[in-house]
Image (tube, coloured by chain):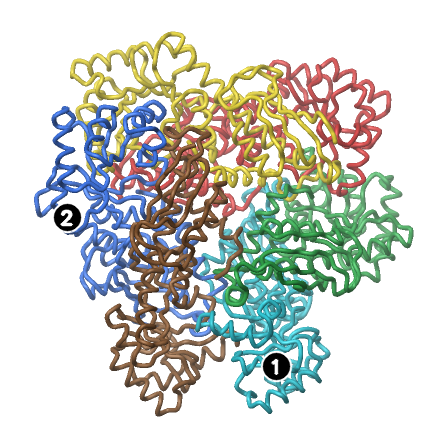
Chain colours: A green, B cyan, C brown, D blue, E red, F yellow
């Protein structure tokens, strides 16, 4: 998910601008215009840092000097300093909340993703954990990058990068087989074709029609096993990627993973984020 | 938080555009270009609907016909239809996720806010529940509106609408008293002045300096009571608004509220949203 | 009205871009591409400098070196140099008018504001002079900042930062009392509530309903006095802020101020600006 | 200055959006969401209406019904209704100030322009009155259109539409003759070339070098006459357009015009606008 | 490449706005403001129509009535009417060039693509013709859609939708094998992985490393055959997609196609477009 | 066509951003984040370099170091290095295509323009070659600048910079004479007036009505001669500029030029660009 710094900077400055509105009235009244301060961005919890690159780009573009103590993807402990920043007091005070909102959402996503990824690794399973497009509007890039930093797979980035046939597409196309065939006929050769199936019986139909990936939608782990058996019988196992989506929790993760599917995707990673608690403290005034 | 429909429409279309990228490759391949379908937006959980106005504005701007079954702020039960939409199949399929992301985030915020508001009302307390600026970047308007729909107070909308002196401002200004006095001297008469205090002792200092609102930051309910007692002795009770912020949970809500403060603000309302589960199902093809 | 330099820079560069269109055809034809020149921005009148920070940010963002001789809010005499700028000749020629338009509008506003503020100060009155939202579209930030630099109060910054009940709101709400009560019930606790009254009789009604600020709209100074007397009798004097708006001129300023109101707001400060005459002269070619 | 309605609409909605910020908190609290009202936009002064087309486009794009009583360029008397508008109360209240700011600036410019144009016409002079680029930033289109509506010439629209050699260009190019010759050599054949001269002696030099238009910068009327005499002797009279700019006032207008120049351009038309007083009154509630 | 009409409309209106600048001065002077006319958009050449949907969306968004005679992808003959449009004369005159530029570029691309596609079809070959990212900046969507309308494959839409390992990536990664393996390890499972090879020997290496698609870069048809033979020996034929890119012309098309590769991609389709000649003629004035 | 670097930078970064989408997935997977490389931008053909300034501005704004070997307007031979760039590998890989698309379109335009310009110069003719508005949407600035670099005249830049009366305007205005007279009456004195004529007979009519420039639309060289004779007889020759447009090819260029017209404008210069072949090769890894 590399993006040139300048492109990212423009996005970030625009997000800050929205928060600033017609000016920061508190900082205007309270902070002198030529004051230099130093501040620390400190974790109030234990987890995985994410959004650090973005925080640095934003703050540096504002003329602040930033020193990174805990980089993206590294574990951070409660009380540990993630960043040190030095520069114009007004600029730091005015951008504080934007920086923290970015860091705490992204670190929250990365922390949960990492937890799940490690749970699988500890169980010696190489199933992937993936995000979905169930994200905060406008923040897709940041949410997906946080999943990646946590060790997960970002999955589809928006509507133009893969063919993902959902239930409603199947309805419109007239069934799984027709949908996959139509997709193969009318899509670019550059795209993978994934299809969501809602019944065990549809899995083989999807595979026969030529899908690259099959997503079992809201299947119990038992149903997943049945679907895999059918695919095995039909000779598709190992030739097609298998994903489960819907209803997977931290608790049921291993149960689903042990069925042998390749990917477990979880909307909750980005639609129900638990913010990671981070604060910024001014520690020195020059 | 009224905003002319056209202004809101532009924001929403831009959010959709980001998700579309260079085009919806799945819909292109699978849905015929002149097909009309009907779909239902259905709650998969029980809670408070929010984002309905936004969903309608977005879908209508795309040329779809929408019928509202459960309006903003109304209770919705699991399985209940919130909206019915009719129109071009490709347009519905392409905007589905944007509409659902909007509805599930906003309904999630409204549902939690309403739960807390009703808990207070049931306990015959008229303490307000308020949001904060700890929100998803770029979605402040939607997050604040959802708090409002849930029955909460949106609090400050961004950096230009009130003077809110946070800990770092106090540090820069050289103490609570100096900070409040500076704020009174250099701010517009149109702004209320709120100051965050971190010690019981600072509460009276803040009141004497002329603050309109005092925020007790990360106080235990016991500390809140002590602060209120000090303010009472000093004759400020009833003349100044009192807010608690930091560390309030669903469980400790009543304990804090029963201290007699006016407002309980909770960052978790918008920084750690639990998405409300909603789906869109195509139910008829014309 | 602090805004991070980078955010302001983007606004300013966009304003310049509009003036440039598809390119500066005069400068292209006449100025060599590698020429360095020095220029002076000189006052052609006597007044108060404003827009200097903006001019510096814009010119520095274009790669020019700028030296400030008279900063924002300082008095400047006819013939005095405000800024010295050095750099690429084409860039200076191409941005000259944008820089001057900014400086002359903002300095014009600051000069008039300061004149009124000093008139009050000389008369030992501490009445505030305030701006309004009667401004040039899109330039609210710059107009308000110029009022502030002149020593005035910026008043409301746009529609989201205070509740200001105007005559038409009163009509829709069904009277002053109802309007104020509705505002208190449905607005955030973070907002002050101001109400515009058009009759002496309404002043007490507004105060009793709980307004924080009362604006006497198009009152004669005699009517203002009557309103103040009524408020005094009702015990509200000193507990509520009083503002007069409408029809105040430089001549009637002291008469209104001597009634004892807190604020005199004047639309003409920003809707009928007399531009401050400033020019840019290239003084050296390298 | 025709611009497709849709293009203009986007500009206008963006200007409104800036004023709205995160929402109109007053209207939200006071006006019910389904209320229809009627309002009149009334002149509080006598002059020339301008900005009417823009006001209509903006209000119609917001879903309001508008009836025009006094169109662009028509004389309007104090107390006369310019527009009648009907529709959603919240939308009218929220867009009121944007509409009025547009109308009062543009009508102010048109009123002054017309006054000068008529003064010349009454004196049987066909000299043109023209605007300049000394305008409010970002509002060039609106300011120029208002000049046009008032009967003036908009002059250059921005930096790409003609070659206008100003004093600083002459300095950089090394004299009037060199500047004009360079312009003729390096500019597109589609552009007129105008040059600003600061001395009588430069007028003939400019004409000989091939300028299409000569601008006498800050000349007294006497100097203008001398320059015209020189041009006459040199055989250029009638073959080149002559413009005076700088220091022209309502009082000196006829004196300058009677010298026989073709155009009098005045920065004050757009840099020192006297707003035309207009208000919006809700007159009926449905 | 479906995109909701409203999203496309915004893109198109923005492109028009750039051409309009500060207003269409010719139309302003010449066309009355209330005149309705009818016009025909006529092909001056024979080929394939494309851009029709975009032209309709733009013109309808401007309030014009449009009737389509030849839709996207249909053959059009010299002299044939593609569209009939009726509406405001000024709007038609002002948008004419934008509409024609869109239609003639897109139809030019579609015409050439179709020509190549039919050449292959006539030779009973099912090789695909594909575009590349060698396009006009900012027009990727339109260029790709035109390729699609012509019967070609749009290939990658931008940098986020597939992994395409070009020569420079191979250099940075340290060889074809390492590059493909790294791509498989660090990319999302949702992406196909294509690798560009510059030597016959690299083809098998790429296949063994697990590439989904191999692109033969600037290969002669003889080299392509050799590469295919190697892949056949190694057992990869039919299991991996093969693409040739670089140096393919209309003349060498069949020679390359007959080697048995799956895709022939040609930068010239979009980087060296021959515009399709189309004009707009006003045919009736109301 | 000078534009301040910062303004141009914003345009260029926006064009890059569109290509990047949600991130460059190939570069993310393959290039380490701290790697510095050097690359050369090499011509694969012989022609005229253009777009070099833009490439430098874009790459420098991304933090890369660029060294120019062949500047804008200089001849470049096949195999010659145009630019050397050094910096972050990911940034170079991600911006490669945007930079090359810019350079190859602009150099393609400049190369063809120069070829025609030199053909005329070699024939000792001083006829100008000019571009038109038949350009790629949104790229007008770049296309026009490339024409200029090639030695051509950019002609009109968009709709606001000159009055160009096309056939459809003539139809609406009711004939050539009426059209030109209307244009003279209602246009700013700052604009030249050009009129397109389609019959020999209209040329004198246009001249008599006062046009500054006459464009012979789709005339044979014989018709051009006839028109010139008519104009000569009527005494207009040398007093009015003459342009031919439509159907001019490289072959017929001299034939048209030898008629004595001043300008030959050719849509093909920008609507049917042959891209100049340029590639970027990483040559060193640090």
Which image quadrant: the C terminus of chain E? top left
Per the model, the C-alpha gap separating discs 1 and 2 is 66 Å
Relative to C19, say whether C137 is above or below.
below
Which image quadrant: the N terminus of chain E? top right
Residue situated in front as seen by the camera: A252 or B142: B142
In contact (CB < 8 Å): disc 1 and disc 2? no
Expressed as whole percent of the image width and height from the top left, the position of residue B46 reads: 67, 70
Q: Which numbered circle lies on residue B203?
A: 1
Q: In which quarter of the image is residue E132?
A: top right
Q: In which quarter of the image is residue D92?
A: bottom left
Position of F202 compared to F117: left or right?
A: left
Q: Which numbered circle lies on residue C280?
A: none
Q: Label 2: which residue?
A: D252
Expressed as whole percent of the image width and height from the top left, the position of residue C137 reads: 37, 56
Expressed as whole percent of the image width and height from the top left, the position of residue F130 reads: 38, 22
Residue at horizontal 55%, vertical 87%? Answer: B236
- What element does badge 2 sit on? loop
Expressed as whole percent of the image width and height from the top left, the position of residue E65 reads: 38, 42
- What element does badge 1 sit on? helix
Chain at numbered mark 1: B
Residue situated in front as seen by the camera: A200 or C168: C168
């Amino acid at each position: 998910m590399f993006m040139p710094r300048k492109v990212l900077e423009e996005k970030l400055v625009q997000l800050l601008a929205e928060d600033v509105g017609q000016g920061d009235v508190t900082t205007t009244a309270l902070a002198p215009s030529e004051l230099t301060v130093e501040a620390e961005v400190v974790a109030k919890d234990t987890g995985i840092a994410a959004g650090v690159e973005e925080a640095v780009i934003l703050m540096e573009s504002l003329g602040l000097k930033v020193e990174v103590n805990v980089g993206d993807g590294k574990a951070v402990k409660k009380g540990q300093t993630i960043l040190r920043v030095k520069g114009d007091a007004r600029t730091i005070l005015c951008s504080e909340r934007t920086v923290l909102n970015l860091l705490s959402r992204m670190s929250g996503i990365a922390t949960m993703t990492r937890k799940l990824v490690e749970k699988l690794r500890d169980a010696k399973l190489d199933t992937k954990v993936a995000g979905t497009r169930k994200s905060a509007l406008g923040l897709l890039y940041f949410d997906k990058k946080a999943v990646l930093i946590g060790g997960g797979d970002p999955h589809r980035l928006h509507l133009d990068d893969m063919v993902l046939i959902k239930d409603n597409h199947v309805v419109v196309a007239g069934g799984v087989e027709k949908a996959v065939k139509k997709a193969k006929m009318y899509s670019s050769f550059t795209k993978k074709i994934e299809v969501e199936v809602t019944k065990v019986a549809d899995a083989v139909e999807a595979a026969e029609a030529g899908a690259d990936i099959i997503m079992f939608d809201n299947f119990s782990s038992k149903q997943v096993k049945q679907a895999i058996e059918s695919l095995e019988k039909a000779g598709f196992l190992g030739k097609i990627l298998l994903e489960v989506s819907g209803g997977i929790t931290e608790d049921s993760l291993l149960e689903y993973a042990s069925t042998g599917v390749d990917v477990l995707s979880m909307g909750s990673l980005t639609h129900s984020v638990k913010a990671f608690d981070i604060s910024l403290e001014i520690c020195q005034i020059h």
